[in-house]
Image (tube, rainbow, N blue to C red):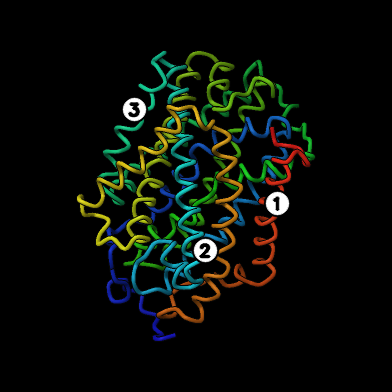
Amino acid sequence: MSENTNTTAGASQYEEGALKVKKLTSMEVIFTVVGCGIGSGCLGTAYSARLAGFPVITFWLIVSGITTLFSMYYVAESALRTRTMMQLPGLADRYVGPIGKILVFLAVTLNSFSCLVAYFSGSADILNALIGIPGWVGTLCFLIPGILVVFFGLKAVGLAGKYLSIAMTIMLIILCGASVVSKNADLSRLFVSNWSYAIPIFNVAAFSYIGQYLVPDLARGLSHDPKKLAPAMLIGQIITAALLILVPLGCFAISPADEITQVATIAWGRALGAWAMYMANIFALIAMFTSFCPISQTLISNIVDFFKFSSDSDNRIRIPIMIVVYAIPLILVFGNFVGFVDAIYFSGTFCAAIMAILPVFMVNSARKNGDFEPVWNCGWMASKPVEAVIIILYGSTIFYAVFSAMGLLPAGW
């Protein structure tokens, strides 16, 4: 390595480059992780697991939560070893090479577009169910305020995520409590499982946690105090895992499997009554909104970093990118080309595998070729046995998806 220092003052270590540094607090990092995780994935887990059962989706949500956190930590250590702030494709280019850069950029882009398709489709369904407006109007009602938040950049996204995630958490706890004590609840459904559907369900669980591409933005926001990055990410991931498990718990407790809808909160709210119908679907809209903002912001920064544009805060660059970023998923949704859960499954299979596996190679290279020794590293979490588990687990999902598409293995739903 070219330099060895344990300096904790981010200003003396890290340089902005094309990506401008806007400070985040630890709480903003925590709730950005939560907001990113509690999005379309959490709304699709119950439907995708309706044949497998609650124990199966819970098991995979725990496993994928742990493995994704380790993978995110690999990205964090790589970022903290790099003087110039850059996005995941830039880090992959430096530490893995051009092929890694292209694979990561494709994974980030496809995952982001899959998320946006799910948000636009889901918001249309929810607002149609709540107030009867046409789907395209519901999508635009969701999109317009999201564009305004994203336009103002990383700091606005962090603030929005912080307050909306707190509100979302409170609503989810109320809904799950009401589901469990409801006269229509059947808690025996929480113990029914069919493990023959276990593998494809992992892909949907993995999608819910995809957040590796978010880490460089978080490292950028905490570059003034980098030792706080890993603890904030851990707390955010624990909260995310708990909330992700609560959604299918509430759905399975209150609704038979054949009544669970693709956007879970629609059937969930109907089963609990009028008040819950509104609360559950407002929760769903907030969940999608809190993910929409950081995913959009990160995609914009990734495009700037990948194509070597001068700045991600220059409106002459930012606005045209935003137009392209939102036009593509809007066309897919309005043209009925992709469904809600299908978008989640596709992204969970291929993008999660790429973004979980490549950071293994990134962190090992960064330890040899980074700019300096950071104030924190992954330790045993980047040991060879742990890395091997991540590679095998996520790599096998791609093969399953291919054989499933060929009809040789059972589909998830």
Whether 133 is drawn above or below 236: the answer is above
Label 3, label 1: how many angstroms apart (C-alpha)? 37 Å
In terms of secondary structure, where does tag 3 sit?
helix
Q: Nearer the viewer, mark 2 or mark 3?
A: 3
The residue tagged 1 is 399
Regarding residue 74, the answer to whether it shows in the image is yes
Residue type pointed to by label 2:
Tyr
Instruction: Give the Cα separation between the discs numbered 2 and 1.
Output: 26 Å
| Residue 108 position (above or below residue 77) | above
Q: For the point 79% across and 39% down, which residue is it?
A: 196
- Disc 3 crowd, CA 10 A, few/some/many (<14, 14-19, 20+): some
Front residue (pair 343, 242): 343
Residue, x 31% and y 51% (percent of image)?
Answer: 154
Q: Which mark is residue 73?
A: 2
> Would you call the spot at circle 2 few (<14 residues within 10 Å), some (14-19), or many (20 or more)?
many
Residue 337 spot, x, y in % from top left: 50, 31
Q: Earlier in the sequence, mark 3 or mark 1?
A: 3
Earlier in the chain: of badge 2 and badge 3, it is 2
Quarter of the image for residue 311 reads: bottom left
Side of 406 relative to 242 (left or right): right
For label 3, the residue is 140
**In this view, the mark in front (3 or 1):** 1
> Which amino acid type is shown beneath numbered disc 3?
Leu
The residue sitting at 70% across, 69% down in the picture is: 385
Q: Nearer the viewer, residue 2 or 162?
A: 2
Q: Secondary structure at mark 2?
A: helix
> Which amino acid type is shown beneath numbered disc 1?
Phe
Q: Are marks 2 and 1 in contact (CB under 8 Å)?
A: no
